[in-house]
Structure formats: C-alpha cells, structure tokens
Amino acid sequence: MELENLKDEFKLVQTNIKVTDDEIKLAERQKEQAEYQKQLAEIDMEIAKVKRRNAERDKYTYETRALQITQGINEAKAFWARANQKWLDVINERLRQNKENHRG
C-alpha cells in the first residue's frame, strides 16, 4: 500500500515537473515574442524619427520657398508701382504742357 502511494506521489511529481517544464517553455516563447516585439517597436521608432527629420526638412524647404515667392511678389508689386508712377508722372507732365500750350 505504501509503495502504491509512493508510486502515485511519484507520478504526481512527474506530472508537476512536466507542467512546470511546459510553463517554462511557454514563458520562454513569450519572452522571445516580447523581445521580437520590442525590436519591431525600436525599428518603428527609428522610422518615425527619420520621417520626422524628413518632414522638418521639407517644412523648412517649403517655408524658405514660400518666403522667396513672397519676396518675388513684393518685388514685382514694387516694380509695377514704380512703373505706374512713372507713367502717371509722364501723363501729368504732358497734360500740364498741353494745358500751357493751349493758354499761351
């Protein structure tokens, strides 16, 4: 009887060892998966950093280009204002001369 109890306890211990081994293997697989997920997350972070740097560079490029375009527009407006003023001055001078010629 005692031998049977020992056999049963031995089987129970073997079963517990097997269950524990399975739990350890599962935990090791989960650890490997977690490490893999961590590596993927690190890669995603690096990609995000590169995208951010590219976006910042693009933003700077577009802001610089927008400033250049604005300056070009302002220069064109100033040119046309000067040209229009010159024509107005010429027209006014001719009108004044015509007025003087008709008087005298």
Image (cartoon, grey):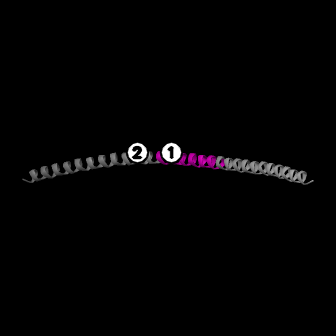
Mark 2 secondary-structure assignment = helix
Q: Residues within 10 Å of mark 1 (few under 14, many from 20)?
A: few
Q: Amino acid at mark 2?
A: Tyr
Q: Residue at the spot x=80%, y=48% of the render?
A: 87
Does residue 25 appear to the left or right of 103 in the view shown?
Answer: left
Mark nearer the N terminus (2 vs 1): 2
Instruction: List x then y, in percent, for residue 39.
Output: 44, 45
- Residue at the limit of the structure toward the left, as seen here: 1
Q: Nearer the viewer, residue 48 or 93?
A: 93
The residue carrying mark 1 is 47
Labels 2, 1: front one: 1
- Residue at the limit of the structure toward the front, as seen here: 103
> In the image, is residue 9 part of the stretch drawn in magenta?
no
Q: What kind of secondary structure does the magenta stretch mostly adopt?
A: helix
The residue carrying mark 2 is 36
Mark 1 secondary-structure assignment = helix
Does residue 101 appear to the left or right of 11 in the view shown?
Answer: right
Q: Residues within 10 Å of mark 2 (few under 14, many from 20)?
A: few
Q: Nearer the viewer, residue 10 or 55?
A: 55
Q: CA distance from mark 2 to mark 1?
A: 17 Å
Q: Nearer the viewer, residue 104 or 87?
A: 104
Query: What mark, if any, has residue 18 been given in the picture?
Result: none
Q: Which residues are magenta?
A: 43-64
Instruction: List x then y, in percent, for residue 33.
Output: 36, 46
> In the image, is residue 56 part of the stretch drawn in magenta?
yes
Instruction: List x then y, in percent, for residue 34.
Output: 38, 48
Q: Amino acid at mark 1?
A: Ile
Q: Nearer the viewer, residue 87 or 95?
A: 95
Q: Are marks 2 and 1 in contact (CB under 8 Å)?
A: no
Instruction: List x then y, in percent, for residue 75.
Output: 74, 49
